[in-house]
Amino acid sequence: MKRSLFLLVLLLTSFAPKKNPVLGKWENPKGDGRMEIITRNNKFYGKLYWLKEPNLPDGTPKMDINNPDPKLQKRHIQGLEIIHDLVDKGNGVFEDGFVYEPKTAKDFNCRLELIGDKLQMQGFIGTPLLGRTELWTRVK
């Protein structure tokens, strides 16, 4: 009886969906921003859930003021979804999505790659060689 129960539990857990290792919370190299990566509709998204300095010196929240769309200028930077539409290509690589940079209010092509417990993020135009790369650390 115990053996049958053990085999049943083993069988059921082997079919349980495995959590993608890119999911979770990540901190940028400067330590002043954190992003949470989630998935929906088989794509991956990243939201700035924490900023070391979410407010301006006068105490008002930092907003997306550089955005050319007046309606979007009222968005808070903290809480902003900056990564969208990434596709899991396998082997810890995520491509075909975009990263939004609030300082320039521009979307760039985005590529993420898991390297151990680090997340390499590349924002670029055309090719990853023409862009910027950062190494994010998992928040524990």
Image (tube, rainbow, N blue to C red):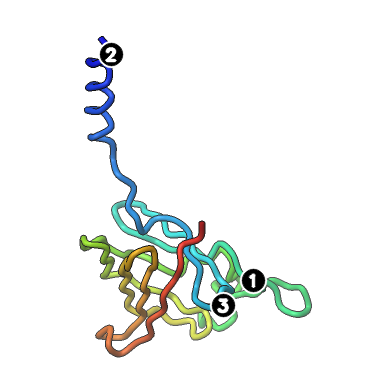
- Relative to 53, is 111 on the left or the right? left
The residue tagged 1 is 52
Is disc 3 surrounded by few (<14), some (14 to 19) or many (20+) residues within 10 Å? few
Query: Which of disc 1 and disc 2 is earlier in sequence?
Result: 2
The numbered disc on residue 70 is 3
Query: Residue 50 location in percent, x, y?
Result: 59, 64
SS for callout 1: loop
Query: Which of disc 3 and disc 1 is earlier in sequence?
Result: 1
Is disc 1 surrounded by few (<14), some (14 to 19) or many (20+) residues within 10 Å? few
Query: Residue 107 location in percent, x, y?
Result: 40, 78
* 25 shown above or below 77: above
* 126 shown above or below 44: below
Is disc 2 surrounded by few (<14), some (14 to 19) or many (20+) residues within 10 Å? few
Query: Residue 29 location in percent, x, y?
Result: 50, 76
Q: CA distance from mark 1 to mark 3?
A: 26 Å
Q: Amino acid at mark 3?
A: Pro
